[in-house]
Image: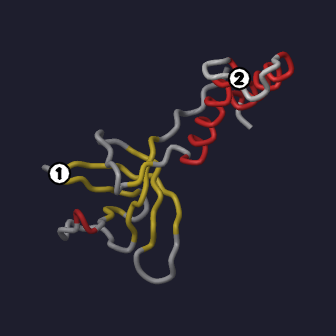
Amino acid sequence: MSRVRTRLEQYKTEIENKSQYKHGLPGSALDIVNTLLNDFEQDEKENGWIPVSEKLPEDEREYLVTLEKVYGTPEIFMGIASYLKFGNDGYWNEKKYGYLEWDKYSDGHGGTTMYKVIAWKPLPKPYEEG
């Protein structure tokens, strides 16, 4: 459990114990905490993944990607891929499989058509001591 979720749960319990308004009033501290908890749960569900059908990266750099196997036995897994722009088109270059193409950008530009990127998100920051 994250520290933010733990802290929000603590605030909720304290507010409920000290308040006669167990269900909260609009704009009350309890209402605010409940709204934040709901938003936090939604963020956890989405987990930061951005479907390529909704948006592509703006920057050329490496991203954590969810790959889908296009042919054969269905398979979904993760990888690290660079998003590269050539003219108006964008391409994914995955470390293991090379250039990945999906229908929108399929122009014979090398790589493999066996896998396609279905979602992406920025890489986390590297661990730092302290």
* Front tag of 1 and 2: 2
Q: Foreground: 106 or 62?
A: 106
Q: Foreground: 62 or 38?
A: 38
Q: Foreground: 67 or 45?
A: 45
- Say which amino acid is labelled 1: Phe
Vertical arrangement, residue 10 with respect to residue 107, above or below = above
Tell me which residue sits at (50%, 77%) in the image: 74
Q: Position of residue 44 (x, y in %)?
A: 60, 43
The secondary structure type at the circle numbered 2 is: helix
Q: Which residue is mark 1?
A: 86
Q: Position of residue 128 (x, y in %)?
A: 60, 26
Q: Which residue is mark 2?
A: 30
State the image quarter where residue 89 is shown.
bottom left
Q: Tell me the quadrant of the picture where the N terminus can be found.
A: top right
| Residues packed near mark 1 inside 10 Å, few (<14), some (14 to 19) or many (20 plus) | few
- Say which amino acid is labelled 2: Leu
The secondary structure type at the circle numbered 1 is: strand
Does residue 57 appear to the left or right of 79 in the view shown? left
